[in-house]
Image: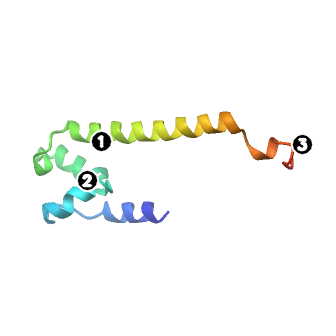
Amino acid sequence: SYVLDATSYLTTFPLSGLPATWIWPLITVMPAGLMAWFPSLMLLGKPPMGLPGWHLALVALLFFGIALYCFQKGLKGYALRGIHRYNAIGHRR
């Protein structure tokens, strides 16, 4: 919840006045800038930092790939081990 609060708080500020050393982490590591600042500048026809319009789609696909990998890994572990409450020592037997 701390990350979501910080992200929603940071998306209300325009990043255009910040130096590039601060903008890059906000559009890569913690993508607060990708949620509001980047798309709004693209709609105005001013691509931020010279990045192409497909940069946003590429980052979304990257995050989708990471989420899909984590989900599949968790699902595979669940399929191998099951859940403890349905085992002999669990409370639903």
Neighbour tally class for label 1: few under 14, some 14-19, many 20 plus, Cα within 10 Å: some
Q: What amino acid type is highlighted by mark number 3?
A: Arg
> Which quadrant holds the C terminus?
top right
Residue with the mark numbered 3? 93
Instruction: Indicate which disc, 1 or 2, sits on the residue closer to the N terminus.
Output: 2
On the image, the x and y values in percent for residue 42 come to: 18, 44
Neighbour tally class for label 2: few under 14, some 14-19, many 20 plus, Cα within 10 Å: some
Q: What amino acid type is highlighted by mark number 2?
A: Ile
On the image, the x and y values in percent for residue 48 come to: 14, 50
On the image, the x and y values in percent for residue 28 come to: 27, 52
Instruction: Indicate which disc, 1 or 3, sits on the residue closer to the N terminus.
Output: 1
Foreground residue among 79 and 64: 79
Residue with the mark numbered 1? 59
For numbered disc 2, what is the local secondary structure? helix
Describe residue 77's horizontal placement relative to residue 13 as left or right.
right
For numbered disc 1, what is the local secondary structure? helix
**Residue appearing at x 30%, y 42% in the figure:** 59
Image: 11 above or below 60: below
Circle 1/circle 2 CB separation < 8 Å: yes
Query: Disc count in the image?
Result: 3
**Residue appearing at x 20%, y 64% in the figure:** 22
* Marks 3, 2: nearer the viewer: 3
What color scheme is it? rainbow
Image: 20 above or below 73: below
